[in-house]
Amino acid sequence: MRELEPKPDRSGGTVQLAIDSDLQEFTARRMGEESGSAVILDCLTGDVLAMVSMPAYDPNSFSDGIGRTEWKSFSEDPRKPLLNKVLNALYPPGSTIKPMGALALLKHGIDPKERIFCPGGYRLGNRFFRCLGRHGSTDMHRAIAKSCNTYFYAMGHRIGYDKIAPMAKRLGLGDKFDLPVVSQNYGTVPDSAWKAKKYEQNSRIVERPDWTASDTLNASIGQGFLIVNPLQLAVMAARIALGRDVEPRLIGVGRKAAPMLDIPQDHLETVRKAMWEVVNGDGTAGASRLPLEGIQMSGKTGTAQVRRIAGGQRGQSGDWKYRDHGLFVFFAPSHAPRYAGAVVIEHGMGGAKAAAPVAKDALTFLFDRPKALQSLAELEKQWGGTLAERNARRAAAIKAAAAARNTA
């Protein structure tokens, strides 16, 4: 190992980013002490207005060489501050993909008014796939609003996942976007061909090469082999919001609207109405309605398991690392969408509980900054100060630990 000769700093050219610096800062602060990410796009142009990964770190720590104690605090932190969670973290999307699944069902002739009875789950052979509740007679609108797994189990089983996967890809899931970044992990949108190839490459990864009915049921509710990153979820929400083929962009400010998708407007409207119900009607995210006159948010909550849970247990307690992730995709205003995005709170135990409130406050900031900042100030009192104040205390603790180590 040898030490390279340092070179003097040299300023580069000026680059205009699409990022809204005020929104970026607010959203980072609003994440509090959570581990996760938040992305907000202009759903007309695809401009990335906020791309927040928390906890974060100060890049200046690396400018003159990072100390051993500080590096250890970063590298061993289970919340992974060195990972860009927007682009490189992968999660099962959970129920956030049910609007996408509904569009696939509509494309393949499912009547949105057809009803499925939900007794609390769906029986496939000798296995019972559980729902989140007992929803009774359920149509597509109610299935999205109440996040009924049984409906999507039954309908997914009917048409098969090979007919759902193309819609997932059409809406941006599994896609690698043309962005000026070092890396992206783009996950997996599985189908029968993918599984056969994966088994051929490494039979230990999957138990059998053929796509099974249980694979379809798991993927239909955003579990199983399906994994995505938060930016893909934000793009999915944006494409549903306006029906435009938006591509995320970080450089420059978009002036031109994205072209239209080849998805029938009546199909999109069916799904949008259900996503409105999620937040503003009898849905799963009613507590996150925007506190703004005449402006409403539409969305879809999601809860994603991080390990297999047997029986009636769920990852709603126990060690932090075993708790369910909380996810939420959204767009606003509902009647004329301009913003869309996704929030993922790692081990947040539910989208309605952990992720939707962050989206609510970030959108409030876009429409009424004083109201959003007042709400944030109250939260930061509970968290022990502003993000800058908390980070300063952490930095001081690391510095003190390093000094103690050097004198030991």
Image (spheres, grey):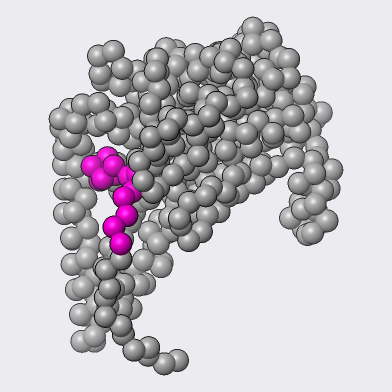
User: On the picture, is 194 further left or further right than 140?
Assistant: right
**Residue that sits furthest to the bottom in the current view:** 2
**Does the image show residue 185?**
yes
Name the one closer to the observer, 35 or 227. 227
- Residue at 62 percent across and 22 percent down: it is 263
**Does the image show residue 120?**
no
Q: How far across and how far down the image is residue 155, in percent?
A: 71, 21
- Residue at 26 percent across and 30 percent down: it is 366
Q: How far across and how far down the image is residue 160, in percent?
A: 77, 28
Quadrant of the drawing holding the N terminus? bottom left
Q: Quadrant of residue 305?
A: top right
- Residue at 30 percent across and 66 percent down: it is 12
Q: Quadrant of residue 374?
A: top left
Q: Is residue 2 magenta?
A: no
- Residue at 55 percent across and 26 percent down: it is 260
Q: How far across and how far down the image is residue 104, in percent?
A: 67, 24
Q: What is the span of residues highlighted in magenta in the rendered image?
A: 13-25
Name the dominant secondary structure of the magenta segment: loop
